[in-house]
Image (cartoon, helix red, strand yellow):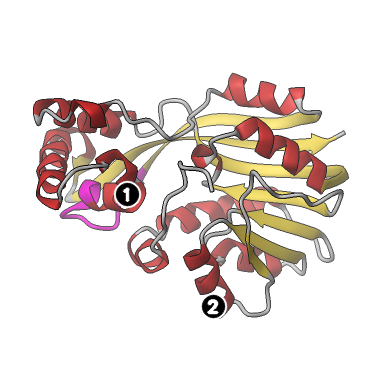
Amino acid sequence: MNENKIKWNSSLYDTKHQFVSEFGEDLVTLLNPKKGEHILDLGCGTGQLAAAIAASGALVEGSDHSEDMIRTAIMTYPHIPFRVEDAEAMDDYMKYDAVFSNAVFHWIANPQKVVCNVYNALKHGGRFVAEFGGKGNVQQILNALNNSFIARKHTENSNIKFWYFPSIGEFTSLLENSGFRVIYAVHFDRPTELTDNVNGVKDWFRMFGEKFFKGLSEQEIEGVLDLTQNSLMSRLFRDGKWFADYVRIRIIAIKQ
């Protein structure tokens, strides 16, 4: 198991961070699934978007490295086959008409390996449709966290990096070098409202950023999060709501 992988809390994910799946509904539209197509939802989480794809009549499978996410998906959507699988270890061969992936690639430690795995899993002419964090994603939030670590004298934590936020040129080149033809690519700002209007930034880090706080006590973590959230109040809190400064990449690539 790659050390960059985190332990996911499926209940917290669904109750307080459901915006991940909600924004992914547009990506399902971009996928445009057809009845009878065999489609893999790579990094399916709790299965909400796999179910949306299945509603088209497509034959959907879902995979995710998180056992907790997959347990929830199986219980919620028993008609869809789900499995626990690391994207870096998948070995399907020419099986799918499409591979779909929402909010996954920024977690990948070896994107070149996963892109090759996706390419191998697709039939000739199959499509890869994905969205994930691109260059500049949550930059204000990360800068504030870094400043808080330094102010609190947790300098080792300020050097922790584990997300992959490529430029659009970097990622499309990776796809093309792996044999894909990129037919659609866009890099765009998408300010995203956080569910908790009181502790939005703090809850966001507790869901997605636990690795930043390695070696810190709960009291130290709370102090860093308080300082981070307070420093962002003037920039990311408006009309009584917290927003994350998301920047996304969205692509469609075809296996030639």
Residue positioned 82% across, 60% down in the render: 37
214 lies left or right of 169: left
Q: Position of residue 22 (x, y in %)?
A: 48, 58
80 lies left or right of 190: right
Q: Position of residue 211 (x, y in %)?
A: 33, 43
Residue at which label 2 appears: 76
Type of amino acid at the residue the image marks with label 1 = Glu
Residue at which label 1 appears: 193
Tell me if mark 1 has few (under 14), some (14-19) or many (20+) residues whose alpha carbon lies within 10 angstroms of its own: some
Residue positioned 54% across, 78% down in the render: 76
Q: Position of residue 20 (x, y in %)?
A: 45, 53
Residue 126 in the magenta stretch? The answer is no
What residue span does the magenta drawing correspond to? 192-202
In the displayed structure, 43 sits above or below 74; it is: above
**Placement of the C terminus among the 4 image quadrants:** top right
Whether residue 136 is visible: yes
Residue positioned 81% across, 42% down in the render: 120
Whether residue 46 is visible: no
Residue positioned 55% across, 67% down in the render: 70
Type of amino acid at the residue the image marks with label 2 = Thr
- Helix, strand or loop at mark 1: strand
Residue 185 lies in what quarter of the image? top right
Q: Position of residue 83 (x, y in %)?
A: 64, 65
**What whole-number distance in Å separates the C-alpha atoms at marks 1 and 2?**
26 Å
Q: Nearer the viewer, residue 148 or 212?
A: 212
Residue 108 lies in what quarter of the image? top right
| Residue mark closest to the camera, 1 vs 2 | 2
